[in-house]
Image (tube, grey):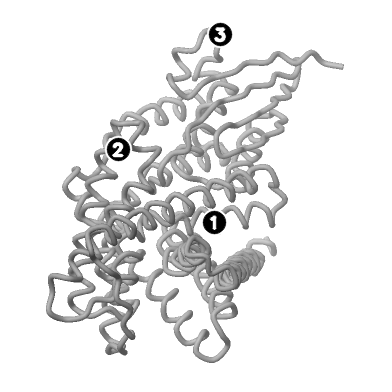
Amino acid sequence: MPHLSDALITEKRSLDQIPHAPKRSEPVGFLLRLSKALHTYGLPAYELENTMNGCAEALGYGIQCMSLPTSISMTFLPPDGVAQTYLIRVAPGEVNLEKLKNTTAIAQKVIDGSLTVEKGAEELKEISRNESIYSNWIITLAPAFVSGAIARIFSGHIYDIIIAMMIGAVVGFLVVASRSRPLLDHLLPSICAFMASLMAIIMSQWVAEPVTVSITIISGLIVLFPGLSLTIAMAELATQNMVSGTARLTGAATVFIQLAFGTALGFEVGKLMNYEMVSIAVQTVPLWSVWFAAAIASVALVPLFEARFRDVGWFLLSSQIAFTTVFFASKYMGASLGAFCGAIAVGLLAKLVSRFFSVPGAMIIMPGFIILVPGSVGYRSIMALVEKDIVGGLETAFNVAVIGISLVAGFLISSMLPLPKDRARDQY
């Protein structure tokens, strides 16, 4: 039985600074740095493990890889040496589509044999050194436009949209401020939810027209909802990544609870200030304005996902396909089957674009799934439980689970459908 040499590598420093860590010019050193980069830039566990398996096989190594939200464990089986096991402690990073696109391109070149390990490792180092594409003021304003657009999609009127945009701007400011303040980062969902609920209640008293407070709060906090993490967690569970899926699912639930706590606290402070939340009926809005709002939201998501503006067209295409499919499918088949059809449409679009335009599938899936994921529904479920509406909360939570399962099923089915070019390749 081969001896396993164990190494624990933390996320606090570069691997180059870790004593006795493999050099980046060596195959094992390159694979360690590649896995850490892919994890940091937002690649799900099942895709990361598949990518690492392909790279290791191309380099002549056997590999056992397990990716978790906060760590990566890898055992390398050299062709003529003893097995080595490495454990990397990785802090969950934000999705960065530009860096993810460049990193996956390096991995693909290594798999194809068109890039050496030494050159690939240096390119990974250059990617990690790159600063954010967008300045802080753009990151601050982007959530405001997303929130305003979502408020319109939820049939909000002009005052709902304005208040949602103001809340979104405050959330964007706090997100930027939390990057250098760990304590604020950990409490960010609760603080933002508290500010959002208090702002919505107070501002609703200042305007002449009735304000739908629930719409303004949900829209203002939309960028913090872990709906995408929830869907990825269910996809990981469906692909037998049990530990990673369970951990990610627990993390999403924790964020929902923080958001609910902050909102409930804001409501209580509002009551102490003699402000009350008034419920009003949502009015129907023109359909063209909803489609336009979906387009605005997709454009505003570009800086939040750290993509380049030359990729705006893909964001627009993905969001419009997702929204159109869900709108018509839900109208005739219900919300669950609507999400199922939307996931199939986005998944097929990602495969087509990736195959014929060499664009990473994440460029299509991420903005498309933002329109599809049940983040706002999950938030409503937690809020119903906080307000002691147990039956309503559990019913809404069940709807969240059904929609999430529908999304995952649709995405997995779309990934199994062969494209015409696949069959053509198989004939040669």
- Calculate the distance from the C-alpha at mark 2 to the C-alpha at mark 3: 34 Å
- Calculate the distance from the C-alpha at mark 3 to the C-alpha at mark 1: 37 Å
Q: Residue under circle 3?
A: 20
Q: Residue furthest top?
A: 19
Type of amino acid under label 3: His
Could you tell which of marks 2 and 3 lies nearer the N-terminus?
3
- Judged by depth in the image, the label closer to the viewer, 2 or 3, is 2
Number of marks:
3
| Proximity of marks 3 and 1: CB atoms separated by less than 8 Å | no
Could you tell which of marks 3 and 1 lies nearer the N-terminus?
3
Q: Is residue 6 left or right of residue 374?
A: right
Give the quadrant of residue 72.
Answer: top right
Q: Residue furthest right?
A: 1
Q: Residue, x 43% and y 39% (percent of image)?
A: 93
Q: Residue, x 60% and y 36% (percent of image)?
A: 55
Q: Secondary structure at mark 2?
A: helix
Whether residue 40 is situated above or below residue 101 in the rendered picture: above
Mark identifier at residue 230: 1
Q: Is residue 298 left or right of residue 7?
A: left
**Position in image of residue 418 (x %, y %):** 64, 68
**Position in image of residue 98 (x %, y %):** 36, 46
- Rate crowding at label 3 as few (under 14), some (14 to 19) or many (20 or more) other CA atoms within 10 Å: few
Q: Residue, x 47% and y 49% (percent of image)?
A: 255
| Proximity of marks 1 and 2: CB atoms separated by less than 8 Å | no
**Position in image of residue 305 (x %, y %):** 35, 51
Q: Quadrant of the N terminus?
A: top right
Mark identifier at residue 178: 2
